[in-house]
């Protein structure tokens, strides 16, 4: 092969860059800054750990592939996340190439913690770059870092980056442009890492810091001053409870205007379409099936976005790890550690990411318990059901002169989910045997203002997921519910609405034999079946069922008043109790099987949640009847 051909091949080769570092170092922000929209997200082969890969072109015109690895504190892996990072960097993943270079991203304000991982990776012998991220924050705090001396101590290039600012990646791109990638190096065996004791590595970290950094003028005590209050054993839990309470008050108070706007738009569109079409199956499908079903679900988007707005703000400003510390003692009493708080909080969005986030828990038993109770957290798919029933049966008025009664009920429902999860964890602890509680070790990032760009991206992602579900799964299920509810039609001389004689009506009456003791009529039973695919589908199914049962368009437009007229308060309370424990959707059970490696736990989860839901609904219904509801 001639020299020219070798140069051409080297120029056309696309190097693979691996980004890795500790959690909270800004690694993913740097990945987003480099790749923009040129990303693809998948799972690593054989596991449900997210794999984010992207591409970018440097100012010099060179193309790169970049891999965002899961956060890790050490290559001596203690969690599945860290094991994936170790295996990818060491070239141990079958079918995947080792990276051509590693970019270690470190938090410039916390080098004492970050440098251990850097020194471990250096022993693998791969081309390396140290991205000294958050240097703007370090300079504001008065932390002095001699970059040139740090580069000399480490023996590889060091560049300063500010991942959250446009242009904050320029120094890294310029360096990558200058790096040669024509020679492929194989990483050293992992034994090179284990050969050096951890204590020796930590001594080396301290030596490097003494040589290259100065904290004499560090003014970064504001975070510590705030933590004196936020992490106070008495004041801290009160602040956490107040924050959560305010969130659920806002979900109802702030959401009303945009919900009314969406509802009016759906009603106007449905009326317009209905006036254009003659009576017949097509008109019934569009008006009762789609606008009466999908439109009913769509109007709850503002409440979901408000809930996630608060969660994203608390996460981005650095408060959520503090909440984990505050809850560590409480969760320790039921056999969990505070580290389970983050997966459980993720389950308020959806149980699936919450279950997947449990892989960061080191203890296998704690990980399994967290997976089994994560679905008891009130996911966003329950919110439309709660909001519909609360709006129909709970008056919209103030209590004690300051609190919205509907928001208070919603808060209590969320609290019931958390309390039931803790009770189940305590029961599993008692039946599986006591397990020595491990101390919680969790990095507390510095407080900072939420980044509007990240907040907007997070809300857009949540809205996109919801609208995609509405336009795909929910729409498909609503068409199916309409079909089953419309055919074969009523016989001659029928005294009931046509839906009573349909396939769905027959199925609902068959299930009502099981659910009548908890107050569910055949209409509710029809809605429960497609709700197994996605819980919010139950709202759309009720809209379709009552639109067809009522035979008018007005019912499709105003479902809450119809339910208030058709159900007793005891039935409404029973259905709320059912959805606190409602058996999981099929996709969640599938993820449980993948994460645990056994279908057995999927069946156990579905079984125990059905038993809890039925028992809670039975008690609620009977007590409500006894009290005259």
Image (cartoon, helix red, strand yellow):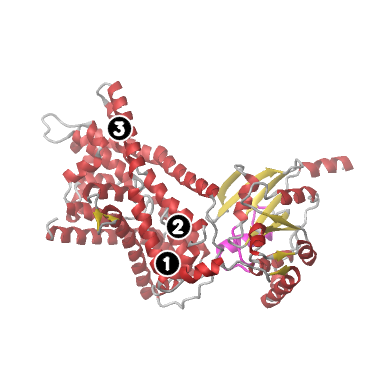
Q: Residue at x 42, y 44 (%)?
A: 466
The residue nearer to you, when weighing 628 against 489, is: 628
Q: Classify mark 2: helix, strand or loop.
A: helix
The magenta-colored residue range is 70-96
Name the quarter where the C terminus is drawn. Answer: bottom left
Q: Is residue 490 above or below residue 68?
A: above
Task: Report, in whole angstroms, how far the alpha carbon at label 2 lies from the one at label 3.
Answer: 34 Å
Q: Which mark is residue 346?
A: 2
Q: Earlier in the sequence, mark 2 or mark 3?
A: 3
Q: Residue at x 35, y 59 (%)?
A: 245
Snapshot quadrant of residue 592: bottom left
Would residue 459 be counted in the magenta stretch?
Answer: no
Residue 297 showing in the rendered view: no
User: Marks 3 and 1: which is nearer the front?
Assistant: 3
Q: Classify mark 1: helix, strand or loop.
A: helix
Q: Which mark is residue 606?
A: none
Q: Residue at x 62, y 42 (%)?
A: 38
Residue 165 showing in the rendered view: yes
Q: Determine contact: label 2, label 3, CB under 8 Å.
A: no
Q: Earlier in the sequence, mark 3 or mark 1?
A: 3
The residue nearer to you, when weighing 173 against 20, is: 173
Q: Which residue is mark 3?
A: 267
User: Marks 2 and 3: which is nearer the front?
Assistant: 3
Q: Which residue is mark 1?
A: 369
Task: Report, in whole angstroms, how far the alpha carbon at label 2 lies from the one at label 1.
Answer: 15 Å
Residue 32 location in percent, x, y?
61, 48
């Amino acid at each position: 092969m001639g020299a020219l051909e070798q140069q051409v091949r080297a120029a056309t080769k696309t190097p693979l860059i691996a980004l890795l570092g500790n959690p909270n170092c800004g690694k993913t922000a740097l990945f987003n800054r480099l790749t923009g929209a040129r990303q693809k997200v998948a799972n690593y082969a054989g596991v449900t750990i997210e794999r984010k890969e992207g591409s970018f072109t440097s100012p010099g015109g060179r193309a790169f592939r970049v891999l965002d690895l899961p956060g890790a504190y050490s290559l001596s892996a203690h969690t599945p996340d860290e094991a994936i990072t170790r295996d990818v960097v060491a070239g141990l993943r079958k079918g995947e190439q080792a990276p051509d270079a590693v970019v270690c991203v470190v938090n410039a304000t916390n080098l004492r913690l970050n440098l251990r991982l850097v020194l471990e990776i250096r022993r693998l012998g791969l081309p390396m770059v140290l991205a000294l991220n958050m240097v703007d924050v370090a300079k504001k705090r008065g932390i002095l870092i001699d970059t040139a001396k740090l580069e000399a101590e480490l023996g590889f290039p060091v560049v300063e980056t500010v991942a959250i600012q446009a242009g904050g990646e320029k120094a890294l791109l310029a360096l990558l442009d200058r790096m040669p990638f024509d020679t492929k190096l194989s990483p050293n065996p992992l034994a090179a890492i284990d050969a050096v004791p951890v204590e020796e590595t930590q001594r080396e970290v301290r030596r490097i810091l003494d040589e290259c950094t100065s904290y004499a003028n560090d003014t970064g005590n504001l975070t510590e001053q705030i933590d004196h209050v936020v992490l106070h054993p008495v004041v801290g839990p009160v602040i956490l409870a107040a924050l959560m309470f305010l969130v659920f008050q806002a979900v109802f108070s702030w959401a009303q205007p945009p919900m009314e706007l969406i509802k009016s738009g759906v009603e106007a569109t449905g009326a317009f379409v209905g006036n254009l079409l003659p009576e017949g199956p097509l008109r019934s499908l569009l008006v009762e099936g789609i606008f009466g079903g999908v439109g009913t679900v769509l109007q709850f988007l503002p409440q979901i976005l408000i809930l996630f707005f608060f969660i994203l703000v608390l996460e981005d400003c650095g408060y959520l790890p503090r909440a984990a510390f505050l809850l560590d003692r409480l969760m320790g009493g039921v056999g969990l550690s505070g580290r389970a708080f983050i997966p459980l909080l993720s389950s308020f969005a959806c149980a699936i990411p919450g279950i997947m986030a449990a892989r960061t828990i080191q203890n296998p038993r704690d990980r399994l318990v967290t997976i089994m109770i994560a679905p008891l957290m009130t996911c966003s798919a329950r919110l439309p059901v709660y909001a519909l029933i609360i709006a129909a049966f709970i008056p919209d008025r103030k209590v004690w002169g300051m609190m919205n009664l509907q928001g208070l009920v919603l808060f209590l429902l969320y609290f019931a989910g958390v309390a039931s999860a803790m009770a189940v964890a305590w029961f599993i602890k008692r039946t599986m045997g006591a397990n020595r509680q491990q101390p919680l070790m969790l990095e507390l990032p510095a407080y900072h203002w939420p980044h509007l760009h990240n907040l907007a991206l997070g809300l857009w992602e949540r809205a996109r997921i919801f609208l995609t579900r509405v336009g795909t799964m929910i729409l498909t299920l609503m068409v199916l519910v309409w079909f089953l509810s419309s055919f074969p039609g009523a016989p001659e001389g029928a005294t009931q609405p046509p839906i009573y004689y349909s396939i769905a009506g027959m199925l609902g009456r068959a299930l009502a034999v099981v659910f009548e003791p908890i107050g569910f009529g055949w209409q509710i039973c029809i809605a429960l079946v497609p709700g197994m695919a996605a819980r919010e589908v139950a709202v759309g199914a009720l809209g379709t069922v009552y639109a067809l049962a009522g035979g008018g368009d007005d019912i499709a437009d105003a479902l809450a008043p119809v339910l208030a007229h058709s159900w007793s308060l005891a039935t409404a309370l029973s259905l709320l109790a059912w959805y606190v424990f409602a058996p999981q959707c099929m996709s969640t059970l599938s993820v449980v099987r993948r994460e645990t490696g056994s279908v057995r736990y999927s069946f156990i989860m579905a079984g125990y949640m059905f038993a809890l839901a039925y028992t809670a609904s039975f008690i609620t219904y009977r007590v409500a009847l006894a009290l005259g509801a």
